Image: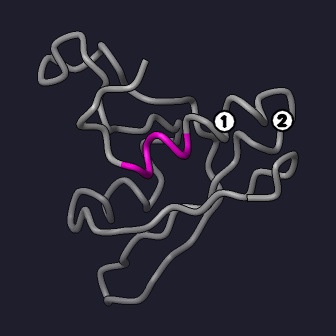
Amino acid sequence: STSATAPAWRQAIKHAMKKNGRNPASKYAQVATIKPDGSPAVRTVVIRGFLDGFLERCAGRECDALVFCTDNRSSKIGEIARDARGEMAWYFPETRE
């Protein structure tokens, strides 16, 4: 169940992931970060889900952190560390959202 304080985006993504779960394309999302020169960088990542229960700050409750895997040599690691602002976009083909 979803916490009453969970943001609407979290609930919408969890619902869409569940409805589209059998389609492998639903695990891909685009992540936009900010390069050191201030320009955007967008790339596709594989989403593994939410970080529920793995962070001490979550203390067994739902956590609003998404998990995606990447090579630690990737430029996005430094970009996120330098400036955590960014955006993520999905397209869920089964439900067209």
Given residues 34 and 26, the one toward you in this image is: 26
Determine whether 79 is above or below 71 in the image: below
| Residue 92 placement (x, y as % from top left) | 76, 51
| Residue 80 placement (x, y as % from top left) | 31, 59
93 vs 6, left or right, is right
Which quadrant of the view contains residue 48?
top right
What amino acid type should be assigned to the residue bearing mark 1? Met
Q: Residue at x 36, y 53 (%)?
A: 77
In the displayed orientation, state which residue is furthest to the front. 4
Membership of 11 in magenta stretch: yes
Given residues 50 and 44, the one toward you in this image is: 50
54 vs 92, left or right, is left
Which is in the foreground here, disc 1 or disc 2? 1
Q: N-terminal of the two: label 1 or label 2?
A: 1
Which quadrant of the view contains residue 3?
top left
Q: Residue at x 64, y 41 (%)?
A: 46
User: Of helix, strand and loop, which one carries label 2?
Assistant: helix
Membership of 73 in magenta stretch: no
**Mark 1 vs mark 2, CA separation in Å:** 10 Å
Residue that carries the numbered disc 2 in the rendered image = 24
Mark 1: few, some, or many residues within 10 Å (few <14, many ≥20)?
A: some
Q: Residue at x 61, y 64 (%)?
A: 43
Q: Residue at x 47, y 40 (%)?
A: 11
Which quadrant of the view contains residue 84?
bottom left
Image quarter (top left, top right, bottom left or bottom right) of the N terminus? top left
Given residues 67 and 13, the one toward you in this image is: 13
Residue that carries the numbered disc 1 in the rendered image = 17
Image quarter (top left, top right, bottom left or bottom right) of the C terminus? bottom right
| Residue 41 placement (x, y as % from top left) | 50, 76
Question: Range of the magenta residues?
Answer: 8-13
What amino acid type should be assigned to the residue bearing mark 2? Pro
